[in-house]
Image: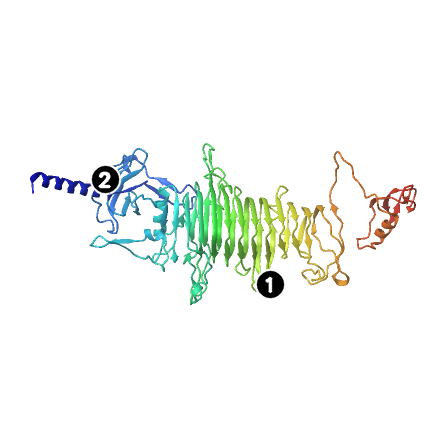
Amino acid sequence: MSISFKFASTFTLLFILCVGLAAAQNKFEGYSFTLEADIRGTCPITYLPSTGAKNAIEVYIAGTDLRQKAPNISPCDGSDVRDGKTYTNGIGRWCFQGPEPMYEVKLTNGASYLWYPTTENTGFYNLKDFRPVTRTQLGKYEFQEPKDYTSTFRNAIQYISSRQGGTLRVPDGDYIVGTLDGVRRDPNYQAITLTSGLNIIGAGSNASVANSNLPWRFSPTRIRLRYPNQSIFRIGGCTNQVTVKDLELMGNSALMGEAKRDTTGTYGVEALGKWEKDSRTGRENPNSSQIFKFENITFQDFDKGIYVHNANDENCKANEQVCKSWHFDYIKVDHGLFMNNKTGIWIDTYNTDWTIANTVFSYIATNGPGDGIRVKAAGSMLIQQTFGGGYDYASAIGGTFLNIDTIGALTVINSGSERGKRTLYTNPAGMITNVNLIMIGSVFGDPIELHGTPNFISTGNWFGADTIKADPGVSITSTGDRFCYDSRIFACKDTSGQFVRRPNFQGGRMMFQTGRLPEGSGDTRIDGKPNRFGYNVELTDGLFQYDPNVTFNDIQKWARGADGRPPVSDGAFVYCKDCRRGGECSQGRAGSDGAFAKRINNRWMCD
């Protein structure tokens, strides 16, 4: 073999080797920051400063407990690798290349995270890939199943946050958070912060029966607590576009053989923020958080399933923040199941707007307060195709479906409640004249208590005989509402079991109400009811046309109530085509006579 051929062969081999090594280099990039939505209510992301290279990182071989620095890494995209550290480029991002499929990066604040390269699948992540890992002597990576998944969730979300968002898939499993080892409470636990652009997607939300030993003691994907006064997820200020779906969130539930556990202060999703104000200059920062979707989630055994409130709830200083006004907006809850919670959803900030659709609230009053939706303060809320209630009208009766202090507008469409103490309660202190409560096409058998001075606009709903009790200051507009079932099937009775012939709103100021025809007979009879205007009526650029075919015989029957209508009272006014004019009305001839008949002192007067 010639020397030239050997040289060529060696050169070719080295070239292929170099190309292979270059091809094996993976690219890793990110930012140095903390992610913590704490109780201060400020924005959760704080970038480490570039001053003094505080945003530099150290890179270690994953699974070595930070004992083995990563060799053979090189900088990229303007970063620098020297002195055992990777330094950021001009826009604060660090970037390095290395042959390993993952590394552990350590920030200058001491926090460390498992870190993956960017690939064609970047943007979609599996929670299991962020579990604790060890590296064997043969260089193989082996993951361990942690007893508690808090750190695993935090690592995954930290990585996703550095990418400005992504989808985190949570496979089938039972995930405990808030403990040291699945049993002992973690005294330093803070809720897992949800970051902007994050989608958390589980394998399914079928509700589990945790205290049984049957197959359904588990759900496909369940994340749960083991102690009171903890939240699973928390949303802080300055957070946008978050979706959580297809999983079960569970509070401090008792498992098979365990005594009842304390759920006080447990929240599935807590949103906490504040509209900041500079006490010196008065400059304001709303720290807005917007566009959240909670879809196909079961919330079970919490104090509050979803809890939205302001920092410093009870001790707000008006010179430091705009009290009760944090901007948490555009929220949708869809296909949810809230069961066995003290309160399903609790909202306490004025600057918030919600849609709750296709959702079920199951609650009992003995797990007090046993409410579906509690609104201390809110901007607007649309509830549609949503239902709430308890399990019976005895020991498992529910509390209140909608418990409202103050809100700009509440619209309820095609929804209902049953087996509860109340469908709707409004607090008189917060129900002022600009509040609109709009109910459409819904079924409400449990009591509705309207206090204060709101506007109650009701269209096409079904109520019981005495469902609604309203304060005198409540303005009511009712079109097409129905009180009681068809009297041919069920008699109309009130809550005490007494027959009711004239079911209606009790109290309030009726602005307008459509009537109903009479029906039934005997005990099951329901009297007819006229259309009613309850305030001044003004006609503009038009006339009021009376029926031209009413006769003297008609008005006589109406006076007696002979055709099922309520007997005519004084003040009635009608055109009679064959009434003779002058004094008390009498029979005349149509075509030559005709007069307006007025009911005065129980007589028809045609003068």
- Say left or right for 74 vs 374: left
Q: Is residue 91 left or right of residue 501?
A: left
Give the labeled residue for mark 2: 74
Residue furthest toward the front?
A: 1
Quadrant occupied by the N terminus: top left
Residue lying at the far top of the rendered structure? 281
Closer to the camera in the image, 136 or 351:
136
Residue 427 versus residue 267: which sits nearer the camera? 267
Label 1, secondary structure: give it.
loop
What quarter of the picture does the C terminus occupy?
A: top right
Query: Mark 1 touching mark 2, by CB under 8 A?
Result: no
Three-letter amino acid code of the residue under disc 2 = Ser
The colour scheme applied to this rendered structure is: rainbow
Position of residue 552 in the picture relative to residue 408 (left or right): right
Query: Residue 214: x and y, percent?
Result: 43, 67
Above-or-below relation of 47 to 447: above
Above/below status of 588 relative to 142: above
Badge 2 marks a residue whose secondary structure is strand
Instruction: Please tell me in which quadrant of the rendered image residue 72 appears.
Output: top left
Amino acid type shown at disc 1: Tyr
**Quarter of the image where one finds residue 48:** top left
Residue 386: where, in percent of width, then height?
A: 56, 53
- Mark 1 or mark 2, earlier in chain: 2
Location of residue 206 in the rendering, given as x and y in whole percent from the top left corner: 46, 58
Q: Quick one: 244 or 448, which is closer to the camera?
A: 244
The local crowd at label 1, few if under 14, some if 14 to 19, many if 20 or more residues have their Cα within 10 Å, is few
Task: Provide the residue designation for mark 1.
Answer: 393
Give the side of residue 164 with respect to residue 516, left or right. Answer: left
Report x, y in % for residue 441. Answer: 63, 51
Q: Residue at x 28, y 53 (%)?
A: 133
